[in-house]
Amino acid sequence: MIRNMTLGQYYPANTVIHALDARIKVVSAFVYIISLFIVNDFKGLLLGFLFLFICIFISKVPVRLIFRSVKPIVPLVTITFLFNLFLSKGTILAKFWIFEITDEGVYHSVYMASRLLLLVVVSSLLTLTTNPVNISEGVEKLLSPFKKIGLPAHEIAMMMMIALRFIPTLMEESDKIIKAQKARGADFENGFVIARAKALVPIVIPLFISAFRIAADLAMAMEARCYKGGEGRTKMKPLILGSNDLVSILVMIIFIVAMITERVIF
């Protein structure tokens, strides 16, 4: 599961999606997520899926990376699917023991599972096509108007960048710890849920220690470079909106209008 996580990883490529301004991509992802909660039927989800499929095709991100982003949440999707399948009221289609499968249960289970998968895929696509540094700069620019009310925009963006930057590092560290524990005879795959949970203790404790060590090294490096916050700092590559960014804004406006129209009409 650890190897399958792609959140925080960046896939470099020379595409239109990669070249877009980070602010546009962050806002577009946010708007897309909101649009998934606006629609309430499969027609809207199908429209969202087609739009996301086109974005993936243009970005040239390998499909295997998209599947890897989905694998870690398969247990959560399965639980969501089963809860909606057996706990929704409606016309009974099948019944065994204390469980009932209804038409509304089938509808809601497939609908909620599909929505959750789309949420994960669009989040992974954002990180796969945008450098973590650019994401943090984009978030800082978007939050900068709120500095007047005391919001620490730079600090929030810095924390986000550090979190995204060190997700792959911590995953790699976790993989090393798991291999070391397996070499010592640890078993993480057999047994019931409680036994597997207990087996994770030798992983969690060293991982926490490693995370604190990495955080201490990072803090020392920032102090050695006289880091004092965002005041007075300049950008080597400032974010500037281009023609492609303006076109993407227009596309997102058309998309959200189409999603709202689909809800109202159908």
Image (spheres, rainbow, N blue to C red):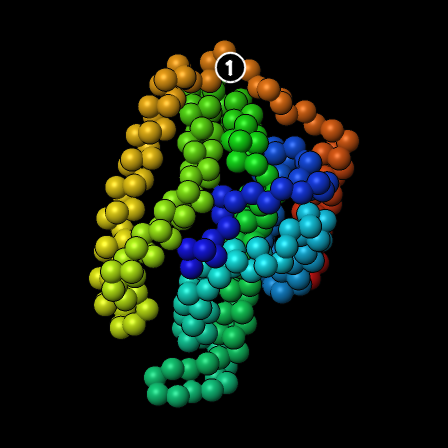
Question: Residue 124 placed where, x, y %?
Answer: 55, 49
Residue drawn at (46%, 64%), measured in percent from left and top?
74
Residue 172 in the image, given as x and y percentages of width and height = 41, 48
* Residue 71 visible in the shown view: yes
Quarter containing the C terminus: bottom right
Per the image, label 1 sits on a secondary structure element best described as loop
Label 1: how many residues lie within 10 Å, few (<14), some (14-19) or many (20+)?
A: few
Location of residue 170 by image quarter: top left
The image shows residue 80 at horizontal and vertical percentages of 43, 66
In the rendered image, the vertical position of residue 70 relative to residue 244, given as above or below: below
Residue furthest to the top = 232
Towards the viewer: 72 or 206: 206
Q: Nearer the viewer, residue 226 or 24?
A: 226
Residue placed under numbered mark 1 in the picture = 233
Residue 77 rendering spot, x and y as whole percentages: 46, 64
Q: Is residue 45 above or below residue 132?
A: below
Q: Quadrant of residue 49?
A: bottom right
